[in-house]
Image (cartoon, rainbow, N blue to C red):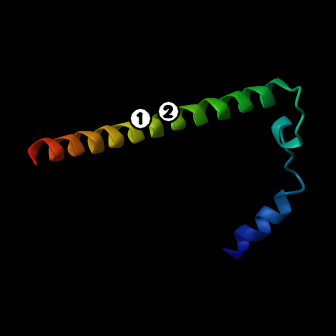
Amino acid sequence: MIRCFYIVILLTNFLSACAVCYGAPDHPVTQGLNKAIFFLLSVITFILLCIMYGMFSIFKRSKNIKTEGA
């Protein structure tokens, strides 16, 4: 475990960051990554909204069944 720590510390001098890490906003890689992040967030939002709609419709149907049965 300690050896891995020393290796990581020694390799940090040889590693360099990409355009995304540097924050070059005009670089195509940065623009593509930003678009990919927004796309994935929209997919997750859509799925969560579908789940919420399903729960709401089940709740509404069960409420209608209770009022009709009483």
Residue underneath mark 2 = 46
Q: Position of residue 2 (x, y in %)?
A: 71, 76
Amino acid type at image mark 1: Cys
How far apart are the two marked residues, 2 and 1, measured between alpha carbons? 6 Å
| Residue 3 picture quarter | bottom right
Q: Which mark is residue 32?
A: none
Rendered view: 27 above or below 15: above
Quadrant including the N terminus: bottom right
Residues 40 and 66: in front is 66
Q: Name which residue lies at 83% across and 39% down.
A: 18
Residue 68 in the image: state x and y as whole percent.
13, 41
User: Secondary structure beneath disc 1?
Assistant: helix
Q: Nearer the viewer, residue 4 or 36?
A: 36
Q: Quadrant of residue 59?
A: top left
Q: Nearer the viewer, residue 61 or 9?
A: 61
Task: Please name the residue shown 88% across and 51% down the image.
Answer: 14
- Element under disc 2: helix
**Label 1: which residue?**
50
Image: 32 above or below 23: above
